[in-house]
Amino acid sequence: MNAYAEPVVSLDLDLVVALESMDEVSSAAEARGMRVERFEHSVNLTSPKSDLRVQLQTDVRYQPFIARAVEREVLGYRMRVAALPDVLQGKLWAYQDVARRASKRQKDLADILRLVETHPHLQVQLPPGVRGTLG
């Protein structure tokens, strides 16, 4: 059994940066010509040179993910990625956020289903309301 989730190809890259480094990271991105947009729970970075959309999480709930991150190879690169239970927790928070668009929440629910299908031991982490939606 894999101890991590296989990557899903996406143009979105979600990152958790230590909050005390957020201004430094944002300034460095701007200095490299990236557009920086600040929102309530994130800082979004885009570049006219790429279709990749980078979202830096500023919600304090994500900060403990940094210490639990594990090194893995992702698409040919060695990098630190969120531990599998943290990936699921982030998806649960996103799905349960009623302020998000319905289409985004459905995508989060599909991601949750994919995670628990490939890693059934994670089902214990699901709240009853979410567990019931998975069938």
Image (cartoon, grey):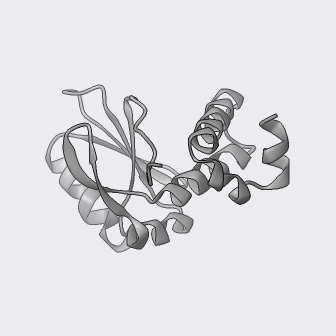
Above or below for 52 versus 56: above
Q: Residue furthest front?
A: 1
Q: Position of residue 14 (x, y in %)?
A: 41, 46
Front-most of residues 54 and 122: 122
Where residue 102 sits, quadrant-wise, is: top right
Residue 97's spot in the image, x, y percent? 70, 48
Which residue is depicted at the point 62% across and 38% down? 108
**Going 53% across and 59% down the picture, which residue do you hit?**
86
Nearer to me, 131 or 57: 131
Left or right: residue 48 versus residue 4 is left
Which residue is drawn at the image coordinates 47% and 60% (left, top)? Answer: 58
Q: Outermost residue, left direction?
A: 32
Measured as percent of width and height from the top left, residue 11 is found at: 37, 29
Up the image or down, 131 lies above or below 25; here it is above
Direction from residue 127 to residue 118 in the image, left or right: left
Compared with 9, 62 (above or below) is: below
Quarter occupied by residue 50 = top left
Which of the two residues, 57 or 6, is positioned nearer the viewer here? 6
Please state, as top left, top right, bottom left or bottom right, where the C terminus lies in the image: top right
List x then y, in percent, for residue 40: 55, 54
Count of all numbered marks drawn on residues in the image: 0
Q: Residue at x 51, y 64 (%)?
A: 62
